[in-house]
């Protein structure tokens, strides 16, 4: 893993390298930023930079992310096969973790949960993990250089683990560097936050995402430009947009169907639409409602005819061309309020058929407000 594999983030890369060159490298660094900005990719590339001693064997080990002085810590779950007193540790899932990160350094918590086989559990970093880390880092460096501990999502540590890690950071073993990859730093102990060098990683620049889509994925310039704007600084979001038959295509179809049927006041068909929505499952329903909020906002902005304000795919824009005028200052706020109420009701296990049928009927009234 090298810096060349990190999409964008040149400013953060330069800052990290400069700390080493000026011999001001802190023993604990925390990379903070939104999902998809490449924090983990940056952390892994920097860890490789620190561990690379220039030999062929070192490069080979780092290429496979199997260097003996590189230690990964990440949230885990308790499998039914584990004993009652066992505290899960990263090594229990080392095979799954290695397979995931070798597919690429950009992934979601959902992807990691799926890899572990525990989609319905809560993943945490246990006290057993901190004990394991103390043992690993107490050993001498096998290559005579740094030992690097990359901790992914330290905010998921339980309190016992966090307190033990605090002691380890306060009195780190010789030539040990901790690199934390954090999305919600406020959930960490203040005493830990005060003892690390925080580096805020920004959203990826649009032009960097566009360039990566063209060079890595073979996307044409125009499509890459649209996707990079939709991605809003997230490479993960850009990859989602690339997926053929993605969830967003279904969501757009359901959005178009609702609006057309509501405009035509086809009550029977709207009932069928609400039944189709009810069959999606609650998490998917909430995602569609969030999509509805975005599309409604984009259609409203489309009316201003300023391209830089609009973030839509080509298919979405094709629909907006004729539909956007129906979303205006007279109904935009009511549409948003209605959608947020639906999100609340679905989250509280209300009858989905009733919620979505009522939503559809109210849309008839709102579309008349031109």
Image: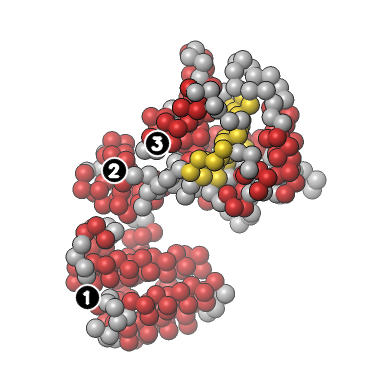
Residue 5 lies, in percent from the top left, at 40, 32
Residue 294 lies, in percent from the top left, at 36, 65
Q: Which mark is residue 325?
A: 1
Q: Which mark is residue 197?
A: none
Residue 266 lies, in percent from the top left, at 30, 85
How many marks are shown on the rendered structure? 3
Task: Assign a secondary structure to mark 3.
Answer: helix
Query: In percent of the image, x 29 and y 43: which residue is there?
Result: 207
Horizontal placement of 19 versus 81: left or right? left
Work out how far the residue at label 1 is from the one at label 2, CA to CA, in angstroms.
31 Å
Whether 366 is drawn above or below 336: the answer is: below
Q: Residues within 10 Å of mark 2 (few under 14, many from 20)?
A: some
* Label 2 sits on residue: 207
* Label 3 sits on residue: 11
Which is nearer the N-term, disc 1 or disc 2?
2
Task: Assign a secondary structure to mark 2.
Answer: helix
Indicate the quadrant containing the C terminus: top left, top right, bottom left or bottom right.
bottom left
User: Looking at the image, can residue 249 be seen?
Assistant: yes
């Amino acid at each position: 893993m090298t810096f060349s594999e990190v999409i964008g983030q040149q400013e953060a890369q330069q800052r990290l390298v400069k700390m080493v060159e000026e011999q001001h490298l802190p023993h604990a660094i925390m990379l903070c930023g939104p999902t998809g900005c490449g924090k983990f990719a940056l952390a892994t590339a920097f860890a490789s930079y620190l561990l690379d001693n220039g030999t062929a064997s070192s490069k080979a080990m780092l290429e496979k992310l199997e260097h003996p002085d590189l230690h990964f810590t990440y949230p885990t779950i308790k499998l039914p096969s584990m004993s009652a007193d066992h505290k899960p540790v990263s090594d229990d899932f080392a095979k799954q973790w290695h397979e995931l990160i070798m597919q690429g350094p950009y992934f979601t918590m959902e992807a990691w949960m799926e890899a572990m086989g525990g989609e319905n559990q809560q993943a945490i970093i246990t006290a057993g993990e901190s004990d394991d880390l103390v043992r690993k880092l107490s050993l001498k460096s096998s290559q005579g250089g740094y030992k690097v501990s990359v901790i992914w999502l330290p905010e998921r540590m339980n309190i016992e683990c966090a307190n033990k890690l605090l002691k380890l950071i306060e009195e780190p073993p010789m030539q040990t560097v901790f690199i934390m990859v954090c999305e919600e730093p406020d959930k960490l102990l203040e005493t830990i936050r005060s003892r690390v060098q925080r580096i805020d990683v920004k959203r990826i620049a649009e032009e960097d995402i566009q360039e990566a889509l063209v060079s890595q994925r073979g996307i044409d310039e125009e499509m890459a430009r649209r996707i990079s704007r939709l991605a809003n600084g997230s490479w993960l979001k850009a990859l989602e947009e690339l997926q053929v038959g993605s969830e967003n295509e279904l969501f757009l179809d359901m959005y178009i169907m609702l609006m057309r049927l509501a405009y035509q006041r086809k009550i029977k068909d709207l009932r069928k639409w609400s039944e189709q929505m009810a069959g999606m499952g609650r998490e998917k329903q909430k995602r569609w409602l969030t999509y509805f909020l975005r599309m409604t906002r984009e259609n409203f902005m489309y009316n201003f005819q300023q391209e830089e304000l609009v973030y839509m795919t080509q298919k979405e824009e094709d629909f907006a061309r004729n539909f956007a005028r129906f979303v205006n200052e007279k109904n935009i706020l009511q549409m948003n309020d209605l959608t947020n109420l639906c999100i609340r009701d679905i989250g509280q296990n209300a009858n989905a058929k009733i919620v979505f049928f009522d939503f559809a009927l109210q849309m008839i009234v709102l579309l008349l407000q031109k």
